[in-house]
Image: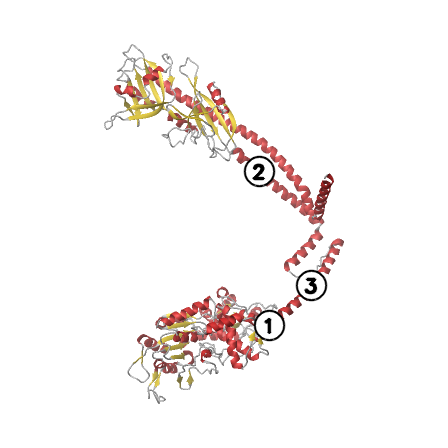
Amino acid sequence: MTEHSDAAATRSWRSITQLFHALGLKAKLLITILPFLAIILAGTGYAMYKVSTEYMDIALERNVRIRDLALAHAVEDHLDQCRRDLLLLSRLSLTPESMPAAFAALQESSSIDYCEFGYIAPNAGQHIFFVTHAGEPHPVPGAAIADIRPSPFRHLDDLPPLRNGEVHPSPILDVEYPLPLPQNTGHRVGERIIRFTTPFTAKGSTSPGHLCLGIRARDLRNLLSLYNSRRSPIWGYPRSDEVRFSYLFDPTGWILFQSDQLDKPNAELGTFLARSGYTGTLGRPGLPCAFRPGTAHADYWNMVMDAAEGRDGILRLRDDGHTSKEVNSYYLSWAPIRFRMSPNKPPMVYAGATFVDRSRLTVTAGYEYIDVMLLITLGSTLLLSLLVYLMSRLSMGPIYRLTKAVSAMQTSGRLQRLTLPESGYETGRLQAAINGMIDRVRDQMEQIRQRDEAIEHVNLKEPARLEGDTALLEEVLQGDMPDIVGVGPRMALFKSDIARAAQVDVDVLVMGETGTGKQLVAEAVHRQSRRAERPFISINCGALDENLLLDALFGHVKGAFSEARSDRKGAFQEADGGTLFLDEIQSASAKVQQALLRAIAMRKIKPLGRDMEVDVDVRLICATNANLAQMIQDGDFREDLYYRLKVLTIQTPPLREHPESIPLLALHYLRQAELLVNRSGMSLSKGAVRKMTGYHWPGNIRELINSITRAAVMAETEVIQAEEIKLEIEGLRYVSPLDQDAIGGCGPCDDPSGQEATPLDETNTTPPGQDDSIPGPESSSEARVQSGDASVDSTKQPDIPPKERHKSVPTRSRSDAPKPTPPISDGPPELNRRQKRALPVIRKRGVVSRNDYQSIVGGKLASRTAIYDLQDMVKKGLLIKEGRGPATRYVVNPKARRLND
């Protein structure tokens, strides 16, 4: 057994030795020096703490004794004052008639409030008694004196023989006085008093009687409370809030009463604090609160015996937790209270005064001392650690620099060869070993990266699993709104808005960006309304000039103008009983807006050349991709027409707000594209789906349709790959609506290769003030309105089943070829005054919209003028255009900024 223990101890010591050798130089120095420093500081601190605590206890003990002796002296003075006042009365030539005046004079001149004054005559019928009640002396009728309980005559029997000039104090008496009142003849008052008695011979009497003077016991209690409060005559410094109290006890061991709160002078006498921790007898005749501890409490009875023999003293006792849980000991000080019956006799011990003091001073000082020692220890430790650090840094500098270089390489994640000058022989060998390891790791990482890229490349070319989207698409196409394809909470709320709008027969304003399907919304509202069986007429207000638009809306009669060879019904009459859809309502001129306002308000129209108005029953649905509220502020749109149209508003969500719909939409339009290119069984690769879901789609659904159609045409296999999905701005990540608000619109993100994606500049082929969007699925083939040589909807739809007709891909699209960024001239470009004033602000912001440019320039700048200025700066290479329609943003060209800098 001994050999086994020795072997275990040897192994443990060997492990500790190995651990110590594995530590660095600084750690070894700290482990060696710091424990000894801590032991020295702790030993010194403990010795100083013990010395200071001892002297602090001596100071506390003396303070407690002084307070108790002062309290006992104050009680003695109070009792002696009563003796002197009684002797003063006894030396006066008092008669029954002069006694009331003498008692009143004593009350005024003395600082003591006496509650009883009486003369017990040797003959019956000559007794006189006064009782103070409510601050006024009241005589007790002679016949009622015998009803005082306990009887004052019996009290005389208990008195020892007294000579003239001797005063005897009674114990505490519970006295009841008859004090008849007019309204209550049986009224009695009670007091707990101390009665002082002395022999007295009244004037005209030959036999001596006795003169009595009484004080309330609670006056002595209030004196104890005064010396235990902050108003004490010997109060010297603030004390903490521990429990401290005083109490009186008599020579027989009864605790009479304790101190109380100074602001409660009339409170009942009590001993609940004084008897805490003691067991014994509670209550004695005449004083129910009195308590007498049992004989088992030797410390208490030793105190009573010392006080009875006239000795004072002090003890430090353990606290049993009855009163305080924070202080484990307290001081118990006592002093005798002496009463001198006459100047010729030695004083007698009347009672004892005890003061119980609990103080956290030593505990608090100990905590403070520990805090100071802790600070000293920490300061010494830090100072010593600094010295060790400096010494080790001087001796281990090269290794430290090597370690720092390796740590920096680990933090940055770049494996680079280490080149440290003045490294020394040992450090140079270590540096060479590390560089060799770095070379091997870099080779292995490159091999792993190439393998991962190959695996990822193959994985992204595999067909994406869209079985769930296929089933969900079939469910959507078979639902109530087969034209509205999309999933997610945003689309659910959108479809709910359409359904609610279809239930009521009021005008609807459809708002949204270009390519979000505003006409599909109008057709869905029409199909689900009560007008579904009636005509649905669609007019594109942006495709016609003012006169043609008025003629298309309201029609004309034969001969109304030179080319009016026959009557023509306008769109309002064509849609009578049904729905009239006005797209791009913001393009309507002021004259058209005025005509529309009257037609909407009165539901009456007047074709050109006709005198009578025609009633029409038409539900109007208008669509816009512009900010009508801003146009109202600019004076380009009538406010009254706006509020006529805006009975119900439906906001078409841009595709970036519900990216979860992109796989479903891509699959849907891929099936349509298969019909256009006469192919079947096509699918999307994982890489293609990832690329589309990571794009922000400034052209919304229309751009998605174009991309899918273009990919279906150009795909070499049945699986469309990521590189076959051509986007307007390659590498642009998806940005949420909240992020767009934060950065002022979408912008290019970093390409994985580290190259910044170059936005494409689109040539604006439309006149200023008109949207550059391309008609797409929003153009309906159900109803066309012809006007001269202008066709409201000339889009040709392929031979697609009616159910899919409104979701077909538009035949007109933008060029697939990306356009390069306009070149930047060597010299500064020529700018007009507006452009010169706005360019510094635009460079500071980094990106602006058309509305931002109008605000920067100031004044009521026309929208088409603002677009012209911005397009001009794009052509001159100062800005780069991003997005289309309301999502169009103009970003500062970084190359132009660097050139100017």
Disc assigned to residue 665: none
Quadrant, the C terminus: bottom right
Dot 2, crowdedness within 10 Å: few (<14), some or many (≥20)? some
Q: Position of residue 262 (x, y in %)?
A: 40, 31
Q: Secondary structure at mark 1?
A: loop
Which quarter of the figure has residue 281?
top left
- Circle 3 crowding by C-alpha within 10 Å: few under 14, some 14–19, many from 20: some
Question: As drawn, which residue projects farthest toward the top?
Answer: 206
The residue under label 2 is 370
Rendered position, 105 above or below 890: above
Q: Give the colouring mode of the picture.
A: secondary structure
Q: Crowding at label 1, few (<14), some or many (≥20) Cα neighbours within 10 Å? A: some
Q: Cβ–Cβ below 8 Å for labels 2 and 3?
A: no
Residue for badge 3: 442
At mark 3, the secondary structure is helix
| Residue 579 image position (x, y, % from top left) | 37, 77
Disc number lying in front (1 or 3): 1
Determine which residue is flagged by label 1. 462
Q: Name the element at disc 2.
A: helix
The span from disc 1 to disc 2 (Cα, nearest Å) is 71 Å
Mark 2 vs 3, N-terminal side: 2
> CA separation, marks 2 and 3?
56 Å
